[in-house]
Image: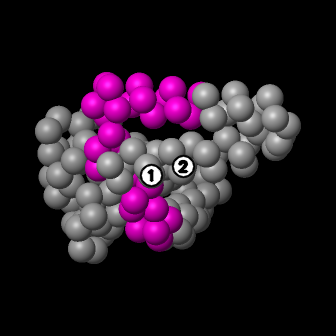
Amino acid sequence: MGYFIGLIVVLTGLWLGLSGLYKTLILSLGVVSIILSTILAYRFDILDREGSPYGRLPQLISYWAWLVVEIFKANWVVVKACLRAQLDINPALVKLKTCCESDLARTVFANSITLTPGTVSVTIEGDKILVHALYEEEAHPEAFEEMDRRSRAASDGGRA
């Protein structure tokens, strides 16, 4: 029931925030669409912890703030590599074992790797992620442990 009410609150907030129109007709159409959407979500049985991550919004915001800092740090390394006279990259593929339990957490982790300059998630198979990195010496599984731990804490609700 909490996910159902939470979905109504989130959809209402999105509708009001994004539409910007507060006329009777528009508001009544918004109410109808929100009711229809929540009933369909309930009937399709997609109202669960993973399908409704807004309950973990503070953890996700904290994680994304940390990730922005990491992206800027990695950006600096890639910019320095691009500006050198000789391109000294040494690409490598590394397979990581993730501690993330849900599909949502694994997706957040893989997308975070891809968002970080110099690394790309190539495939996900179960709890293993294949990552392409620009520098072999920095592409060891331990280098991704903190991101894995933090994405799991933000998405699965575990401790960081």
Q: Secondary structure at mark 2?
A: helix
Vertical arrangement, residue 45 with respect to residue 116, above or below: above
Residue 103 image offset from top left, x and y in percent = 25, 42
Closest to the observer, 136 or 19: 19
The amino acid pointed to by label 2 is Val
Vertical arrangement, residue 130 with respect to residue 157, above or below: above
Write down the residue under mark 2.
10
Q: Residue at x 54, y 51 (%)?
A: 9
- Main SS of the magenta part reads helix
The amino acid pointed to by label 1 is Gly
Disc 1 to disc 2: CB gap under 8 Å: yes
Closest to the observer, 123 or 49: 49
Asked whether, in this view, residue 137 is left or right of residue 99, the answer is right
Q: Secondary structure at mark 1?
A: helix
| Residue 36: in magenta span | yes
Residue 100: image quadrant is bottom left
Write down the residue under mark 1.
6
